[in-house]
Amino acid sequence: MKDYQSDGNLNYDDLSGGSVGEVKGYGPCYVCWEKPLVWKDLYISCPGWDEERNRECQNTRKSNWYHATDSGKTEISNRAHIKCTSCYTDRHMSHWVFNCGEHRGDNYWGTRRGTFRASLKIAMQIGDYEEFVDNLIAHMSSHRNDPEVRSDWK
């Protein structure tokens, strides 16, 4: 459109967000409709899962997390992504591995939905994290079948 005049050929419903047939507040992601993308420092306890012992990491100390590749600080989004603020690597949180320094050897452990939820709930005690974490957990629940989520997270 070049100006603000009405155009009889334009379907204004297409501009209201969502595709034809979708109703705001329904469908696969009710969280995404009204919530803007938000990034926060990844400040949680270790979400690692010890496959060998079939248990979560016992380290419950909260800390900032850094990308091992370039020591960049990491952030987490309310859309279940983690990114490095230095190299901008950005992937779904199910594809990151963690080492809090208390794992045997130099092992990086993967995560599970449950261990990440537990770590996020601990983080809720910090400042304005509560709404953020609630939105993230709802997003995780709504998107557990997305192709970008690791198969063992589903």
Image: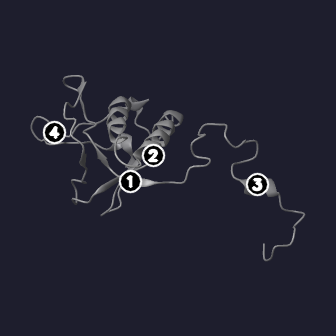
Q: Which of the 4 quarters of the picture holds residue 133? A: top left
Mark 2: amino acid? Phe
Q: Which mark is residue 14?
A: 3
Using residue 21 as the reference point, say whether residue 77 is left or right of it.
Answer: left
Q: Secondary structure at mark 3?
A: helix
Give the mark, 3 or 2, whose residue is nearer the N terminus: 3
- Residue located at (87% from left, 63% from top): 9
Give the mark, 4 or 1, whose residue is nearer the N terminus: 1
Kindly report which numbered mark, 1 or 3, lies closer to the viewer in this rendering: 1
Which of the pair 145/66 is nearer the observer?
Answer: 66
Task: Tell whether label 2 touches label 3 (CB within 8 Å).
Answer: no
Residue topped by disc 2: 132
Seen from this angle, which residue lies furthest bottom? 2
Which of the pair 129/140 is nearer the observer?
Answer: 129
CA–CA distance in space, label 3 to label 4? 49 Å
The percent position of residue 112, horizontal first and vertical second, equals 34, 32
Q: Which mark is residue 40?
A: 1
Seen from this angle, which residue lies furthest left? 105
Residue topped by disc 4: 107
Please tell me whether residue 9 is drawn above or below residue 65 in the rendered image: below
Is the residue marked by circle 4 packed among few (<14), some (14-19), or many (20+) residues within 10 Å?
Answer: some
Which of the pair 63/76 is nearer the observer?
Answer: 63
